[in-house]
Image (cartoon, rainbow, N blue to C red):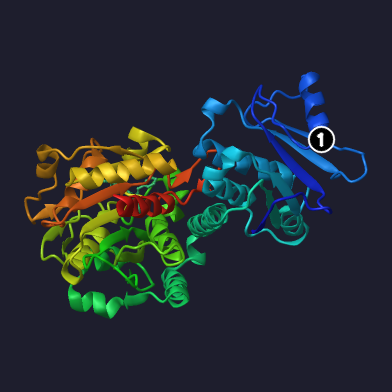
Amino acid sequence: MQFTVLTSLPFEIETLILPVFENEPTVFPKPYQTLVKLRFKNKDFTGKAGEMVMLFPEEKGLPSRVLVWGLGTKDTFSGPVLRGLAAELVRKLKTFSRREVALWCLPGFAFLAQELAEGVEFGNFSLAKFKTGKEKEEIENAMIGKISFIVKKDTLSFRKALKKGFLIAEAVCRVRDLVNRGPSLKHVDYLVEQSKGIARKHGYSLRILDQKQLEKKGMHGILGVNRGSDMEAKMVVLEYTPPKTDKKKPIVFIGKGIIFDSGGYNLKPGQSLQEMQLDMAGAAVIMGLFEVLKPLQLHHHVVGIFPLTDNVINAKAQKPSDIVTTYSGKTVEIVNTDAEGRMILCDAITYAIRHFQPEYIIDIATLTGVCVLALGERFAGLFGNDAELLKKLKHAGETCDELLWELPIHPDDRKKMKSKIADLRNHDFSPQAGALKAAAFLEEFVEDKKWAHIDIAGPAFVKDPKKYESPMGTGFGVRLFVTFLEELRKG
Ligand code: BES
Ligand code: ZN
Ligand code: ZN
């Protein structure tokens, strides 16, 4: 979305938004003051969060539409609240088909410009990417094309924060689009091409490990999952080395990239198959993160790794009771072909350790259905072996409203992942503590590295979205990682 910052009202503006706190009329320039005051007086409007009243002033020189916008009480107002309200506001504006709008900014917005911009962009997001004809035209025509922020004082920091908010939200929206689309529209090579585009655009170094290279390295965790597929597995490795990097050791982010999870021979029952295009959400988050790393000039050396394959079946597909040798050398008994995420992640973790000296390894994955049962859609499960790292991630989550809830790894659950016939097994026949056992399995591969595992099966794809989300893909993780990297720098 285009935006401008202005210190006075543009003459030609058609739609002006006037934000108002609950029971606390703001002071606006004269003609607006009268308009708003009257509404308060008549109790047409009280300023409750999300309340909106459209006025159609007939006076000459005034915009033809003035939307009075309630922000709630001052003490409940915050960045996340503004993000949600701004998204709601834009959704409302879209019903009026106004392409250009101006928003009167209150002094309190100065420190919340990033959240404001994110909310505005999220409100413009449309799920209907594959509609055609008249409906498509209507949706496109309703989108807000340009917004002017009217401020008392134009500062560089305000503009920068707005720009940052739009940039991040655009990346998140691209992640949502990727997660939502069906598997045939995001096959492995499509995502590889997208990754090449990101690398080219920002000058990242990029390595694609194709089937042959995966075989040469002995990454049979990934290859095993890929055996039933008619498309090659690939692993994407993106690397960002900022010009004045102070740390040699990178932070490695790893994302699960299952294009479609049918469950394999442990085929998922009908309803559970329904949303399994979501299973590359972890990989999509890494792509989203790399869309913004360089533009935001984040100062960390960052590596992003995502193995890509679908988990489908043919006669060659991996079967329960098969045994695979992972890249680490450890053997795994495949008890359940539907526990495939951990099989591709473990090879990526070993790759991270062998090829980089990671300061941290952080994996993000739609890993277990039971994590959704435990934590629902608001919280991602957080696991790991370094209290300091987990604390930082949790804090970043609170800052940006992508919440993490720490779950334990118990020695008994570690034991359950041992196999009688091989070193490990990928499942132990019981759904109890499934998210914890998945984490215990991954932990076997992290050696002495500081590691965190984030299970986003709940918040990556939702039925009950937050105000600034839509149903389906949320892009959960991009803002979390950006905030984490920023807070890491600030110390
Ligand atoms: N991709 C699924 C997890 C999932 C389920 C994500 C529902 C989002 C919503 C994962 O690969 C899976 O199938 N996990 C199994 C693990 C089990 C076989 C140990 C599960 O959760 O049932
Ligand atoms: Zn699965
Ligand atoms: Zn899966």
Residue at x 27% of width, y 61% of height: 252
Residue 445's quadrant in the figure?
bottom left
Residue at x 86% of width, y 43% of height: 62
Dot 1: what SS?
helix
The foreground one among 474 and 90 is 90
Q: Residue furthest front?
A: 153
Relative to 20, residue 5 above or below? below
On the image, the x and y values in percent for residue 57 come to 88, 37
Direction from residue 57 to residue 104 in the image, left or right: left
Q: Does residue 92 show up? A: yes
Q: Which amino acid does label 1 sit on?
A: Lys
Direction from residue 169 to residue 365 in the image, left or right: left
Relative to 25, residue 220 above or below? below
Residue 107's quadrant in the figure?
top right
On the image, the x and y values in percent for residue 388 come to 21, 45
On the image, the x and y values in percent for residue 456 come to 37, 46
Residue at x 14% of width, y 47% of height: 417
Label 1: which residue?
A: 30
